Image (spheres, helix red, strand yellow):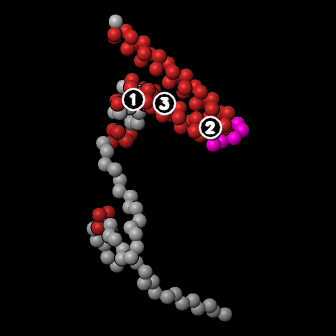
């Protein structure tokens, strides 16, 4: 008994080779939103291979960003404390139970700072008057 096996011809393969660039693939499909395309970030090899250790990064992470230097002015800081105290006091009135107690505690703490600011401003005013 003989088995005859017939194999169909293989028609799958590479038809054409062309140069392809990532930029060529970015096109807006009609009626659809464009899916995000991954484009690698160009960086020096040394920056990729030699990442800074935690010891090297920690000092820069702990230093504050002083780009907004207006908040460091005493008057701005004092106004910010007053506004925060008002916000926490108002939030405490709306809440109940433990949340109310915590928010009221924060508002009281900020009120202490506001009173210290006012005392300091009054003392400085007296000092400047002579």
Q: Name the residue located 63 percent from the left edge and 92 percent from the top edge.
A: 2
Q: Are marks 3 and 2 in contact (CB under 8 Å)?
A: no
Q: Position of residue 40 (x, y in %)?
A: 35, 53
Q: Residue 91 versus residue 55: which sits nearer the camera?
A: 91
Whether residue 56 is visible to the viewer of this picture, yes or no, is no
Q: Secondary structure at mark 2?
A: helix
Q: Position of residue 14 (x, y in %)?
A: 37, 76
Mark 3 or mark 2: whose residue is earlier in sequence: 3
Q: Secondary structure at mark 1?
A: helix
Classified by dominant secondary structure, the portion drawn in magenta counts as helix
Q: Secondary structure at mark 3?
A: helix
Whether residue 81 is visible to the viewer of this picture, yes or no, is yes
Q: Residue 93 versus residue 4: which sits nearer the camera?
A: 93
Q: Check disc 3: other Cα within 10 Å, few if <14, some if 14-19, many if 20+.
A: some
Q: Name the residue located 34 percent from the left edge and 71 percent from the top edge.
A: 28
Q: Position of residue 91 (x, y in %)?
A: 59, 40
Q: Furthest residue to the bottom?
A: 1
Residue 76's disc number: 1
Quick check: 20 left or right of 114?
left
Quadrant showing the C terminus:
top left
Residue 116's disc number: none
What's drawn in magenta, residue-wise? Answer: 92-98
The image quarter containing residue 69 is: top left
Q: Furthest residue to the right?
A: 97
Residue 95 in the magenta stretch? The answer is yes
Residue named by callout 3? 82
Q: Name the residue located 28 percent from the left edge and 71 percent from the top edge.
A: 18
Mark 1 or mark 2: whose residue is earlier in sequence: 1
Residue named by callout 2? 92
Which numbered mark, 3 or 1, is in the foreground of this view?
3
């Amino acid at each position: 008994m003989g088995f005859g096996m017939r194999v169909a011809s293989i028609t799958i393969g590479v038809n054409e080779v062309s140069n392809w660039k990532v930029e060529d693939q970015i096109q807006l499909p009609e009626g659809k939103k464009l899916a995000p395309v991954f484009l690698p970030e160009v960086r020096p090899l040394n920056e990729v291979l030699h990442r800074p250790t935690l010891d090297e990064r920690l000092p820069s992470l702990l230093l504050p960003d002083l780009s907004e230097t207006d908040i460091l002015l005493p008057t701005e800081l004092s106004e910010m404390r007053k506004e925060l105290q008002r916000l926490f006091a108002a939030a405490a009135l709306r809440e109940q139970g433990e949340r109310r107690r915590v928010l009221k505690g924060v508002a009281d703490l900020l009120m202490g700072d506001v009173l210290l600011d006012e005392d300091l401003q009054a003392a400085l005013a007296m000092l400047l008057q002579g």
